[in-house]
Image: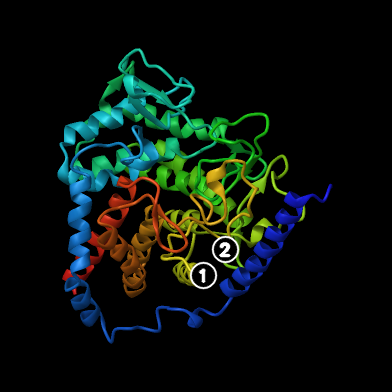
Amino acid sequence: MKFNKNNVFLLICLAGVTTLQSCAVQDASRPAEDTLNAESNHFSNNKELAVNILNNPDLTLVLEKARSILKKGLNAGSGYGEVWIRDLNTFIELALEVQDKAELRRSLLVFFHFQGKDGNIIDGYIPAEKANVSYKYIRSNTMPNLLGHKNTVETDQESSLVQAVHKYVRKTGDYSILSEEINGLSVRQRLSMALRYLLEHRYDAGYGLIWGATTSDWGDVQPEHSWGVELDSSSHRSIDIYDNAMFIVAIKNYISLIASETSDQKVWQSVADKIKANTRKHLWDRELHKFRPHIYLEGSPFPEDFDEHRIYYHGGTAIAIEAGILSKEEVLQVFNDMVNNKMFAGAGSIGLTVYPPYPAGFFKNKSMGPFSYQNGGDWTWFGGRMIQQLIAYGYIEQAYQECLPMLERVRVNNGFFEWYTIDNQPSGSGTFRGSAGVLGKAVQMLLKWAKEQ
């Protein structure tokens, strides 16, 4: 290795991040009582907490703003022209309250028109005249005015579509969508094809888990390429918590949609049980109560002396909770870890993607520097989902306390930004529907709980 100025700078960055990593792991291993936990309440009882929630004007303000944003349009946000399934999946419930149900139904069906013969689902679609990004666009004979595209680095499009259809049916009661025929196959059949695609094309038999390209947590950018959205000869296949947790949730949703079909239920329940067991076996670190970032199938894209296991993945952990992979006690442990990470990083919320971030230069995409974008950026899009899970598991006060900075950002910045910098400054798309959807739902859950007390 030649020691020029750039190499010296990289070594300094590595040394600094290694120090941060040691702090992060040490902090994450601290007893739960060192941070906010279920036993150290700020409120004397549930009634007092409920009154505080109901009297907080930020909750109704944020919910109204979220509904306003979701009244029109299904594209991801003001900075994007595409309708992406991973985004639509996170705001479809709230959108169904303020948009025409038929439009949401039509949007979901578009994805099946572009479904591959092997069952794969595209990332998103856009009107042909607006397609100006360097994607390898996909055409559909039955949707000639639209172009689709697939980020092959991801392994969540199929799971996201199954989840979105489930949310649509649960919200509307419109089971007829499952019988809708598209190019000779029903939506019910196509949902099964989407799940089977993951088992047939993204499944590693050695670990009994599904794989994708190496990314930062739930991200869609691999480190080996300046853009990083397509699997190629430079990619490093790996297994992570986000993809597998999303798959488990999708299977659970699919089973609930086919409740009358006992044999199919048993097959898919067996798959979900095995994925869950193998996730616990291979990805969960019980001692540090965290998930391993990656299991590499053909080597890592990062330097041999880089200890990636020091990095804590916030987003994938939140989805793992939704998938039922962690116990209630473990949910509290990882929540305390996220609070600790937020404090160490000086971040605004537990939506912090990862902590510590990957060092400078580890991703060729320049947007992926430390504490930027998907490498330590602070995303309400996933932080809001963690709030939802805290509420679902009964940790109401913790959810409320950690939701407050997210609510305040919406009020101060008059909207839902895509992500926030480490010093809490808005960045990315100025209107991001995913953030509005997940935070709006979290607010609804808090208000519902408070009204029931």
Quarter holding residue 130: top left
Please state the horizontal and vertical placement of residue 391, each as a whole percent of the image. 33, 66
Q: In which quarter of the image is the C terminus?
A: bottom left
| Above or below 35: residue 440 | above
Q: Which residue lies furthest to the top in this view?
A: 141
User: SS class of the residue under badge 1?
Assistant: helix
Contact (Cβ within 8 Å) of mark 1 with mark 2: yes
Q: Quadrant of residue 149?
A: top left
Kind of residue at badge 1 = Asp
Return the residue at label 1: 337
Say if 55 sits above or below 432 in the image. Answer: below
Q: Nearer the viewer, residue 436 or 162?
A: 436
> Where does residue 388 sit, x and y in percent of width and height?
34, 60
- The picture places residue 436, in percent across and down from the top left corner, at 28, 51
Q: Is mark 2 on a helix, strand or loop?
A: strand
422, 195: nearer the viewer: 422
| Residue with the most extreme right position | 1
| Residue that badge 2 annotates | 290
Circle nearer the N terminus (1, 2)? 2
